[in-house]
Amino acid sequence: MTQRMHDEAHGGALGSRLNWLRAAVLGANDGIVSTAGLVVGVAGATSDRTALLTAGLAGLLAGSMSMAVGEYVSVSTQRDSERAALALEKRELREQPQEELEELTALLERRGLSQEVAREAALQLTERDALRAHASVELGINPDELANPWHAAWASFLAFTVGALLPLLAIVLPPEGARLPVTVGSVLAALVVTGWASARLGAARPGRALVRNVVGGALAMGITYAAGSLLGAVGA
């Protein structure tokens, strides 16, 4: 019971951590699949280790930078929206405090409080910190924990890089005859792990997530290998 109450009391922080973990798992999964598809496709056209390493590094850098820039832009937009919403709420509290108090009372009533209790709670919250109260209840925003685009960008960059390193090392380190089997096997094993982790973080059953992840990765590698083999045959 104590543990359950503790988790509920920190539900917002727990949800935030889970979102970060889920983003990290998905970023690593993207790095695994995209880089594996790239290097396996190149392996279908050539067995040259330098070409494989060059292609893998290019894919890793391009993918990780793309993920980082995309997250930075996306989270920056989210933060700008949060700041704009807080600025508007602050102005409304200054210009029409009574209307804002009534609004807060109504919002608390919708959450299950009686009219009397909701009114008293709204009064106390307003006296303590009106902006914080409206940000939390009305907007779902914590003014002290606005989205940080730099954190998101670095997290995406690192997650993608970690994921991409697996197929890159698997394709260049083994001897020529073992490269494809080692790469395919290690990638599919890693996709089992990321599929299971993403399902568990989303409180879903892992079975379907594992199948989707593994089948998707296998298809990506199979299609790119076939394309690389065809291009290699044409080039020869």
Image (cartoon, grey):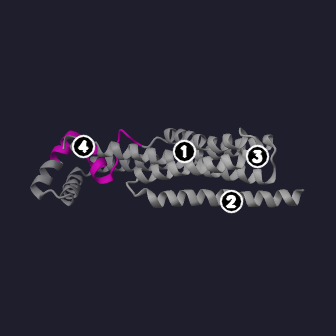
- Disc 1 and disc 2: Cα gap in Å? 32 Å
Q: Main secondary structure of the magenta part?
A: helix
Asked whether disc 1 touches disc 3, contact meaning CB atoms under 8 Å apart, the reply is no
The amino acid sitting under disc 3 is Gly
- Disc 1 and disc 4: Cα gap in Å? 30 Å
Tell which circle, 4 or 2, labels the residue nearer the N-terminal end.
4
Mark 3 against mark 4, which lies toward the viewer? 3
Label annotation for residue 177: 3
Residue 230, above or below 22: below
Mark 2 against mark 3, which lies toward the viewer? 3
The amino acid sitting under disc 2 is Gly
- Residue shown at 76% from the left, 46% from the top: 177
Residue 166, above or below 96: above
Q: Secondary structure at mark 3?
A: helix
Q: Secondary structure at mark 4?
A: helix
Residue 99, located in which quarter of the rendered image?
Answer: bottom left
Query: Badge 4 is on which residue?
Result: 9
Asked whether disc 1 touches disc 4, contact meaning CB atoms under 8 Å apart, the reply is no
- Residue shown at 16% from the left, 47% from the top: 123
Tell which circle, 1 or 3, labels the residue nearer the N-terminal end.
1
Q: Which residues are magenta?
A: 123-146
Task: Determine crowd level at label 2: few under 14, some 14-19, many 20+ residues with C-alpha closer than 10 A.
Answer: some
Nearer to us in this view, 222 or 61: 222
Query: Badge 1 is on which residue?
Result: 72
Q: Position of residue 19 (x, y in %)?
A: 42, 47
Mark 1 against mark 3, which lies toward the viewer? 3
Tell which circle, 1 or 2, labels the residue nearer the N-terminal end.
1
Q: Position of residue 231 (x, y in %)?
A: 82, 59
The amino acid sitting under disc 1 is Tyr
Mark 1 against mark 2, which lies toward the viewer? 2
